[in-house]
Amino acid sequence: MARPLNFVILAGAPDEARELREALNSGQRARVVAVGDSADQGYALVTRWRPSAVIITLSAEPKTDWALCRQISAFCPETMIICASRNSSPDLILDSLRAGAREFLRLPVIAEELNTVVDRTAEFCAGESKTARKRGRVVAVFGAKGGCGCSFIAANLAMAMGSSTAIIDLNLQAASQDLLFGVRPRFSISDLVENLTRLDDQLITRYLVEVAPRVRLLPAPPDAAAAEEIRADHIAEVIGILRERHDHVVLDMPHAFDTITIAALDQADEILLALTLDILSARAAQRAMVIFGRLSYPRERVRIVLNRWNQQSDLELKHVEKFLGERVTSFIPEDYRAVVSSINIGRPLVASQSSSAIVAELRRLAVICGGQPTRPQPGRRGSLLNAIFRRQSARADVKLETAPQKA
């Protein structure tokens, strides 16, 4: 039997949501994966679940509903939009189609009409699977806590991708990528958000800064006050726009979980969780993993990146991996002098020290995230890590289970 079609329901009235859910779940071909009651929540659910279809029940004043239809149609084209209402006037149906809906469902639900809509959803999904637009891969770099080197990793990862890449500085209250790349941008993400309704390729190019061949930066606002006008749905739109024009989009994330952060993480194909080898960082990473689980992010989407790795740490790697329930994907070795020098001159390390161990590992991480090798790789992981793992057995173990609860 074919896999069931996934539906998201967006209904302001609980009775309408219940009616639609029961009608869809009563058959074998459809299942409801999420229900929302507002436009912002609905868009977040669609981008998170990427369902076969979304059913939007129209309000008495449907201007917000039309805007949501256009937003989903533009940035989630693989999801079929179905409008539903107790008012089935020709004008309302026509307005729904103009806003991007493919079908209109009368309420209360008529079983025969619902079956027809499910049939057409299956046909739509079959067609989309053959003609789906190419979407760039989104990699979010998220720090377990402040000071884990998240911005440094994001900047160098973007440089190491070896393909068309955009990097977005989402530290909206504390911009840093302009310094890491040594640029003084005229525009920022706030300018792009302000002009979302009239964006074209020329305007997008104007707002991004070319920091290297095939690498462009969308900076954070230079004035923290400007960031207050940016909403979660803006972030989702911006990421959607840039991923259609680049092979990769790298997100430099703040380490706090707020609506902006979650909206960005919802778009990510991979989340790099950066931490350092200390108890506070490991505990913060474990809490982040719990939140990722509550947000229904698949475990395979999250990769652990250990930054500033050195052999002098008293905290054993095996205990960190056991505590997190995940293996570490990447070990970025510590080289304080080289890192600080690259930051001070405003040039990512990947662009200036091709032979260093840090660069070799960053390039390997880029390939793991779908990037293209830009130079011969240093070999298998063991070539760099064998030396790292040669540690004296006499070193004392520090077990996370017995770590103090307060710093």
Image: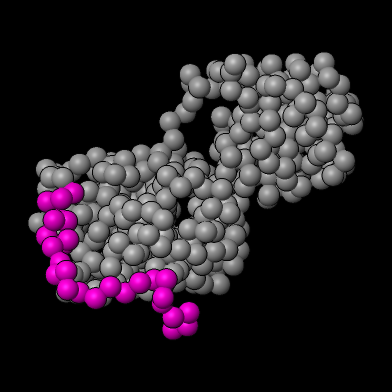
Q: Quadrant of residue 376?
A: top left
Colouring chosen for the image of the structure = one colour
Based on the picture, tell me whether residue 406 belongs to the magenta stretch: yes
Based on the picture, tell me whether residue 125 belongs to the magenta stretch: no
Q: Quadrant of residue 145?
A: bottom left
Position of residue 174 relative to residue 213, above or below, is below
Position of residue 77 relative to residue 256, above or below, is above
In the picture as drawn, the residue positioned furthest to the bottom comes out as 407
In the picture as drawn, the residue positioned furthest to the front comes out as 394
178 and 268: which is toward the camera: 268
Determine the residue positioned at 86% across, 21% down.
Answer: 110
Determine the residue positioned at 59% across, 16% down.
Answer: 1
30 and 66: which is toward the camera: 30
> Would you say residue 352 is visible in this rendering?
no
Q: Quadrant of residue 93?
A: top right
Q: Position of residue 37 (x, y in %)?
A: 76, 47
Q: Position of residue 225 (x, y in %)?
A: 56, 72
320 vs 363, left or right, is right
Tally of marks:
0
Position of residue 294 relative to residue 284, above or below, is above
128 and 211: which is toward the camera: 128
Give the residues drawn in magenta, as a range: 381-407
Q: Quadrant of the C terminus?
A: bottom left
Determine the residue positioned at 49% across, 45% down.
Answer: 298
237 vs 379, left or right, is right
> Would you say residue 369 is visible in this rendering?
yes
Position of residue 197 relative to residue 306, above or below, is above
2 vs 406, left or right, is right
Q: Position of residue 53 (x, y in %)?
A: 65, 30
Q: Position of residue 248 (x, y in %)?
A: 36, 43
Determine the residue positioned at 51% across, 67% down.
Answer: 256
